[in-house]
Amino acid sequence: MASIRELRGRIRSVGSIRQITRAMEMVASTKLRRFQEKAVASRPYAQEIAGLVSRLASMLGDSVEGRPLFRRGENEGVAVLLVSSDRGLCGAYNSNVFRKLELWLAEKNFGTVTWYVYGRKGYQYLQRRGREVEHLLVEPALEQVDYRAAARTARLVTDAFLAGRFREVFIFYTAFESVVRYVPTAAQLLPVEKSAIDTGKATPDVILEPDAETIFDRLVPRYLETRIYNALLEALTSEYASRRVSMKNATDAARDMGKILKGIYNRKRQENITKELLDIVGGVEALR
């Protein structure tokens, strides 16, 4: 059994760990609220732009399917934009994403996959498995990502798709549903599926200036940028929700461990005191 001095050191260590995890839990809670507010605030814009694209698509009719962003590429390869985290200590967030990714890849049975990655954890995971990453998107950092960064990413994958490099482009991220539920999700970015933009709204009788085709061609890239931006926000929100839960569990575990160690320490100290008293009493009796 550990000595009293060793138990004191372990109690202090556990107390220090509890303070650190508690502080990290508070930081994660603050960032969770911030990113959750951003994600919720961006949804009306995303829904509105999807509605505009849908209404314009219904006005243009079958001609939409002949446009470059609505046709599959001739190449057999596909591209995947994987969104993970830059840092660990976020529970099963990354492992759930990677597990779902492997199941998804096995189900789809793609040939050549080109990888675009947000988050160093995803980059490290792919590198360990011998998968070459074409682009690791690090500027700006994932936590500082904004709409302009999402727009650059959208242009990057769109230009490669239009150049004929890929048949399809997918985004794999963690969709945020609540503070206790976040689901790894795969979504097709390109070619744009009409079902993804079909909002079911009737086309209003309006006069468009310039014509509907020009507006539609300019609006579709904005729609793709918005989808990527929302996916990044939801992934960040999910990451901090998972980190908050993980740090809370670590704090609770450290508290429980501290209680156990203190109980062992008190029993050990009481045993030593009792032993010393018995030695004193025995010595007194021997002197008599």
Image (cartoon, helix red, strand yellow):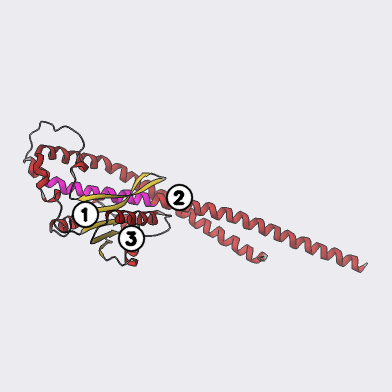
Asked if residue 79 lies in the magenta stretch, the reply is no
Residue 7 falls left or right of residue 206: right
Which residue was labeled with disc 2? 245
Q: 70 above or below 129?
A: above
- Camera-nearest label, 1 or 3: 1
Label 1 and label 2: CA atoms lie apart by: 33 Å
> Where is residue 242 drawn, in percent x and y?
41, 51
Q: Residue furthest right?
A: 288
**Could you give the CA–CA distance between mark 2 and mark 3, rounded to whole angstroms?**
21 Å
| Tag 3 residue | 122
Give SS at disc 2. helix
What segment carries the magenta color? Answer: 217-239
Q: Is residue 219 magenta?
A: yes
In contact (CB < 8 Å): disc 1 and disc 3: no
Where residue 288 appears, x then y in whole percent? Answer: 93, 67
Q: Amino acid at mark 1?
A: Val
Q: Residues within 10 Å of mark 1 (few under 14, many from 20)?
A: many
Q: Give residue 90's mark.
A: none
The answer to whether the residue labelled 1 contacts the one labelled 2, judged by CB atoms less than 8 Å apart, is no
Image quadrant assignment for residue 59: top left
Kindly identify the residue that appears in the image at 70 percent across and 58 percent down. 267
Q: What amino acid type should be assigned to the residue bearing mark 2?
A: Val
- Between tags 2 and 3, which lies in front? 3
Asked which quadrant contains residue 154, the reply is bottom left
